[in-house]
Image (tube, rainbow, N blue to C red):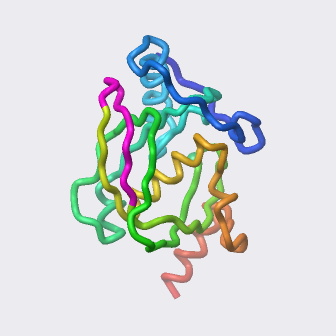
Amino acid sequence: MALLKIARMGHPVLRQIAEPVRNPISPEIQILISDMLETLADCGGIGLAAPQVHVPLRVVIYSVPGERMNAEGEDGPGVPMTVLINPRIEILGEEREIGPEACLSVPGLIGMVERWRSIRLTALGADGAPFEREAHGFHARVIQHECDHLDGVLYPQRMTDMTTLAFAEEARRYAAQAAAD
Ligand code: NI
């Protein structure tokens, strides 16, 4: 196990199209997954894509805390830590939603991004077995954000209103002030 260094915006690996994984159960991929899990636990983020740790392969890990789902009006206990290998997203419906996003590769910042509200995800798990799930709201947003990393896209490239790009610390301070007023 090892903590991996996070690539930050400007590093070319974040602009690359990541390669599909040929053999999910190979020792190299299993080590990559366990190192990514350890790295994400250490950073305290919600998701991590392999290009963010300088590995241009189509691997993502993510989880969704229950309180984040519930805050967006979704029921349920949240989504446990999930490994996605060679994930594919199918858009369900035409509804889009604007919400805040942050990224370990764009530290300190937050911005509003429009995403599809509902998607169907298909991927291989860490055991190499295919699975699929539907995701809505914040859960769907997390998957779209992480899968964008596999295509060399960071959330600021998805933003349509750059005036919402802010330092998270300042955004929190002025949101708290506005709430108190
Ligand atoms: Ni990110």
Number of numbered discs on residues: 0
134 sits to left or right of 153? left
Q: Residue at x 59, y 70 (%)?
A: 173
Q: Which residues are magenta?
A: 119-129
Name the outermost residue toward the left.
76
Residue at x-position 39% and y-position 64%: 92
Q: Is 118 in front, or is 63?
A: 118
Image position of 31 with respect to 52: above or below: above
Residue visible at 31% across and 60% down in the picture: 67
Which of these two is toward me, 15 or 53?
15
Q: Quadrant of residue 15?
A: top right
Vertical arrangement, residue 58 with respect to residue 106, above or below: above
Image x and y of residue 124, in percent: 37, 33
Q: Is residue 77 left or right of residue 93?
A: left
Q: Residue at x 45, y 27 (%)?
A: 38
- Residue 39 on the magenta segment: no
Where is residue 141? Give x, y as percent: 46, 58
- Give the farthest residue toward the bottom: 181
Whether residue 137 sits left or right of residue 6 in the image: it is left
Determine whether 27 is above or below 135 in the image. above
Q: Residue 63, position in %: x, y?
A: 37, 45
The stretch drawn in magenta includes residue 123: yes
- Could you say where residue 8 lies in the image, as x and y percent from the top left? 70, 40
* Front residue (pair 43, 117): 117
Hey, which quadrant is residue 10 in on the image?
top right
